[in-house]
Amino acid sequence: MGWLLVGSMNMDARSSRSNTELGLVIDHPALAEDALALMQLHWSDSHYRLRIAGERHDRVEWIEPDDDKPVVYRAEPHVSWLSRVRLGVFSMFVAEDLL
């Protein structure tokens, strides 16, 4: 069995409760496999993979694909220090269960 989800919904609790985004679930195994194959073909070299890291699994790492050796970032790549400060300040005003 294979399902394909096409839509704009973020996969977090806030989006499922607060946003009016759309998602279309298609129960069609062949179509789901084709979509996955296309994504792997066209996107696998241009997107970061995420993994949980740290002794207490309290950190996220971004892995950039590379033919020789993947590059691992401990902070979100291509985000300026000013943006990090802004996000830190804004996060103080948002309830944890909405993140």
Image (spheres, rainbow, N blue to C red):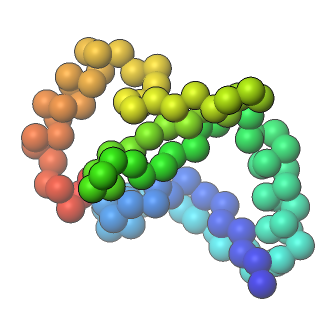
Q: In the current view of this chain or complex, which residue is farthest to the front?
A: 55
Tell me: 14 left or right of 22. left
**Residue 87 seen in the figure:** yes
Q: Quadrant of residue 97?
A: bottom left
Q: Quadrant of residue 71?
A: top right
Tell me: 69 left or right of 29. left
Residue 49: % across, % down: 58, 44
Tell me: 36 left or right of 60. right
User: Which residue occupies 72% across, 69% down?
Assistant: 4
Q: Quadrant of residue 61?
A: top left
User: Which residue occupies 31% across, 60% down?
Assistant: 14
**Residue 46 seen in the figure:** no
Q: In the current view of this chain or complex, which residue is farthest to the bottom?
A: 1
Residue 74: % across, % down: 39, 32
Residue 76: % across, % down: 41, 30
User: Which residue occupies 84% across, 66% down?
Assistant: 33
> Which quadrant is the N terminus positioned in?
bottom right
Above or below, comparing residue 28 to residue 99 in the picture = below
9 vs 97, nearest the viewer: 97
Q: In the current view of this chain or complex, which residue is farthest to the left?
A: 92
